[in-house]
Amino acid sequence: MATATPAAPTAARHIVNFITGNANKLREVKEILEPAIQVDSQELDLIEVQGTVEEVTLDKCRRAADLIQGPVLVEDTCLCFNSLNGLPGPYIKWFMKSLGHDGLNNLLAAYEDKSAKAICTFGYSPGPGHEPILFQGITEGKIVPPRGPAFFGWDAIFEYEGETYAEMDKVKKNSISHRGKALEKLQAWFIKEMTA
């Protein structure tokens, strides 16, 4: 009697080389995109220009495509405090390293308005010489004293509808987060490109 051969796993429809050295970001991107889009990763030490999140992401994407000589996906994340006219914005990584959760809260101590926007911008380029395409997601929330595990950036101080990102289970966070929203747009673009 012949035994059935297990079906081969479905091949990914597209492969992207995500440029990051952040294991938490890589994990989230893989959780959201795979298996429809295969996510490989590579760490590059890219110079980040100063400017808007769009300018930073476009420049980073062009540099990465030139270095990799192929398709790349880059990401830039902002945390924008409304009472500080959008700061720290694209510089949140450096603010977080220097001030930590308590210091970020202290920036808003003199303000009644604790509202904030989490913004994620992905840049995709098929390779050198191609103008990157941007995909942006925004989640509105507020800054609160840290709650939940503090292992991923500022997740413990960004609250959305009563829970910080750090308190949410992964599935819920990925469905409502700035990163999840941006990747949803990226997925929709890839699907459109493949069916065109």
Image (tube, grey):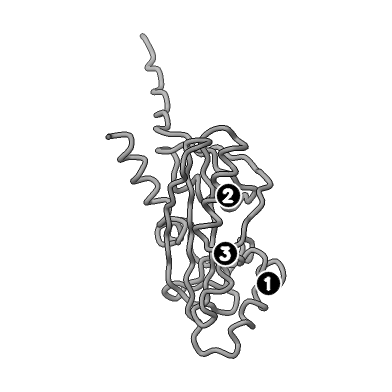
Q: CA distance from mark 3 to mark 1?
A: 16 Å
Q: Quadrant of residue 182?
A: bottom left
Q: Position of residue 18 (x, y in %)?
A: 55, 43
Does residue 135 appear to the left or right of 147 in the view shown? left
Q: CA distance from mark 1 to mark 2?
A: 25 Å
Q: Secondary structure at mark 2?
A: helix
Q: CA distance from mark 2 to mark 3?
A: 13 Å
Toward the right, the furthest residue is: 98
Instruction: Single out the mark in the foreground, 3 or 1.
Output: 3
* Residue at the image position 59 percent from the left and 42 percent from the top: 64
Three-letter amino acid code of the residue under disc 2: Lys
Residue 63 sits above or below residue 94 on the image: above
Tag on residue 181? none
Residue placed under numbered mark 1 in the picture = 100
Q: In this view of the protein, which residue sits in the foreground, 1 or 64? A: 64
Three-letter amino acid code of the residue under disc 1: Gly
Around disc 2, counting alpha carbons within 10 Å, would you say few (fewer than 14), some (14 to 19), or many (20 or more)? many
Residue placed under numbered mark 2 in the picture = 60
Q: Position of residue 95 (x, y in %)?
A: 66, 70
Quadrant holding the N terminus:
top left
Q: In this view of the protein, which residue sits in the foreground, 149 or 156? A: 156
Quadrant holding the C terminus:
top left
Three-letter amino acid code of the residue under disc 3: Pro
* Residue at the image position 52 percent from the left and 51 percent from the top: 58
For marks 2 and 3 on the same chain, the one whose residue lies earlier in the sequence: 2
Residue placed under numbered mark 3 in the picture = 90
Does residue 137 appear to the left or right of 81 in the view shown? left
Q: Secondary structure at mark 1?
A: helix
* Residue at the image position 61 percent from the left and 66 percent from the top: 91
Around disc 1, counting alpha carbons within 10 Å, would you say few (fewer than 14), some (14 to 19), or many (20 or more)? some
